Image (tube, rainbow, N blue to C red):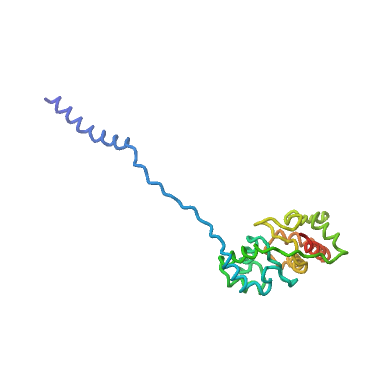
Amino acid sequence: MKLLASLLFAASLAAPAFSTLAQEAKPAAPQAEVKVEPVKAVKPDLVKGEASYAAVCAACHAADGNSGIPVNPKLAQQHPEYLVKQLQEFKSGKRANAIMSGFAGTLSDADMKNIAYWVSSKNAKPGFAKEKELVTLGERIYRGGIADRQVAACAGCHSPNGAGIPAQYPRLGGQHADYTAAQLTSFRDGVRKNSLQMTQVAAKMNDREIKAVSDYIAGLR
């Protein structure tokens, strides 16, 4: 009788342990998968871009982005990513220009994108080199750089025909020589500070070299 009581008592102690082991061994219920929706890039609205461009930009850069004013850049066929970056930096003050900072300050990021993609869809009109006595020097700098001062060839980043590399380096071909020369001088003199690479290049160039390469770029196509 005592033996039977002992066995029953031992069984009562073992039951909770077996129950716990059974629960531990039981596989956990599968968790529901959480689906992450991919972020969709918002496409530029070219209709809005055209309207905003006409209202804000056309007076200085012409209706189709082919500015006829030598000190104002041609924007047609420029890489849109580059244009957006410049507008953002005008707005933030990283690129100093009182006129452009004022205009850019009125634009949202969506406005900038719409404008940039619209004007980049316009064909750039070709330009012309005018400084015949400097064309050889300009070509040499653009294609070969200035070796003794370790100035890299412009063509390495902006391509042999001036088309540039989308999203990295801007299109230069056909740009007004006056505008290009002004930007190179601004980089050299520390006025324009939004490209360390260009500051380092321009810092090693004199006025004659800047004029020559700017004029050569105007004739690229």
Q: Is residue 147 above or below residue 102?
A: above
Rendered residue at 64%/66% (across/down): 94
Q: Nearer the viewer, residue 131 or 123?
A: 123
Left or right? Give the position of 132 relative to 154.
right
Q: Position of residue 139 (x, y in %)?
A: 82, 58
As drawn, the residue found furthest toward the right would be 133
Quarter of the view holding residue 221 = bottom right
Q: Position of residue 125 (x, y in %)?
A: 73, 65
Rendered residue at 51%/56% (across/down): 40
Rendered residue at 71%/57% (across/down): 164
Q: Nearer the viewer, residue 117 or 139?
A: 117
Question: What number of labels is visible?
Answer: 0
Q: Position of residue 126 (x, y in %)?
A: 75, 64
Quarter of the view holding residue 88 = bottom right
Task: Tell me the quarter of the image containing the N terminus.
Answer: top left
Left or right? Give the position of 182 relative to 20.
right
Q: Position of residue 147 (x, y in %)?
A: 82, 54
Q: Is residue 200 above or below residue 91?
A: above
Quarter of the view holding residue 71 = bottom right
Rendered residue at 62%/70% (across/down): 53
